Amino acid sequence: MKRKIFDIPSMMVFASLMLLTSCAGLKELNKEYTDVVQPQIDADTYGNTAVIQQASKTSSLGDLSWRTLFNDHYLEALVDSALAHNLDMEVCRKRIQEAEISLDVAKKAFLPSVSLSPNGSITHIDGTTMKLYDVPLNIDWQVDIFGSLRNAKKSQRVLLERSQDIMQAVQCQLVANISSLYYQLLMLDRSRQILLKTEEVWKESVETQKALMQAGMSSRAAVDRLTASYYSIKAQILDNETQILTIENVICRLMGEAPHKIARGVFGNFTPPAEVGIGIPLEVLQNRPDVRSAQKAIEAAFYNRQVARADMYPKLTLGGSVGWMNGTLGEINPAQIMLNALASLTAPLFAQGKLSGNLKMSEIEMEIAQKQFVQTVLDAGNDVNTALIEFQAADRKGEYLKKETESLAQAYDATCELMNRGRANYLEVLTAQESLLTAQLAEVVNAYNKASGLINLYIALGGGR
């Protein structure tokens, strides 16, 4: 014996009426995100100083690959290793996987929910045993009339794109950090060469002054003064070696490796582009991962607001069950086929202010995202402005420091010659040596500042991809 139960509730008719009377609301809920809700980027984001106006180009430095910009196979190997093994990059990859799973779940929300819930009971009353069971297969399907599921899926898609932007931001910062530390190592190597050479000169000067003192042509004060300067140089060499080891350890950490010696090139091989163009703000800053991420935050907030709006409308759910149940109270068999279909319409009337509160909060979140986007763009423009000024200042300063070093080297040679002729004393030679050392080290530091400024400008323009 088979029994068929099929029920079509009257609320299906009510649902149809609700749909016909909510066309305006349905149109509002079906709106798509557009750039109209996104604040526009000002053309003067970089600032209006003359130095920037002269350097502005249509093409951007940020469009170059970091491999093309740096062109150093030692640095390239370090960056590749860091991108492959850096733990922050690994976390970003895992976050992207999480976002992909969340998007997949949001897509599958359009499918029916199927569950199996068998149950049975045995009841003994007055000597009579009643055995009841049913094995229903329950099916529920939410009809996405007002776009709640659709907007939730779009929000998850945007969050996935944001995760990818965050990963790119981490990658850009990693490229910048490795590059900056690498050039610090080259700078310290060059500084160490200068210090070692100066140490030799100082040592010879000390020996010379000792010989002159024994010959009665110099004093103990002159020897002690030169000796103190000599030990000062040796202390600077030790500091230099410590800094080199520290930076090597930091690079190894960024690569996810135990501390070891870092293979590297020679300071001075880095040649920046002849012309540094920063491009138009509207076109360039949108290539920055943090700016794109801020844009995605507005888009995600928009779709979350749409979901909150959709929650204010009724939800239509189609459901049913199919399965088997026993035919008599005292026997397990024969079984009967059970078929049931239903539809439910849930219309929110009063939910303790939660739905209206969620809608208001989603609107506030969207306003916050818009303001954060504006601040991100302002910060990005400030980064470009600062990095460009630093790079250009170091570039111009390098010419002056080079001439200063050349002049001081000539002055030192001339002072040594005068002292050999007896026309200059040890104090003049010492002063010339210290001035030359200071100028040489300043020139090396400025060369690093120029490379560092270019790296910062490159990243500020959205490079590092």
Image (spheres, rainbow, N blue to C red):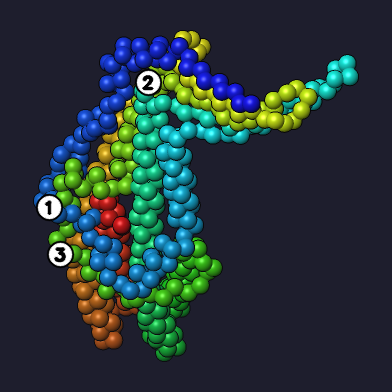
Say which label, 1 or 3, has the lower sequence index: 1
* Contact between labelled residues 3 and 1, with CB atoms less than 8 Å apart: no
Q: Is residue 136 left or right of residue 121?
A: left
Residue 453 showing in the rendered view = no
* The N terminus: image quadrant: top right
Q: Is residue 122 left or right of 341 when viewed as pictured?
A: right
Q: To which residue does mark 1 refer?
A: 57
The kind of residue tagged 3 is Ala
Kindly state the secondary structure of the residue where label 1 is placed: loop
Q: Which residue is mark 3?
A: 274
Task: Say what amino acid the circle numbered 2 marks.
Answer: Arg
Residue at 57% x, 29% y: name it: 322
Q: Position of residue 252 (x, y in %)?
A: 48, 66
Residue picked out by circle 2: 309
Q: Secondary structure at mark 2?
A: helix
Q: Position of residue 105 (x, y in %)?
A: 46, 39
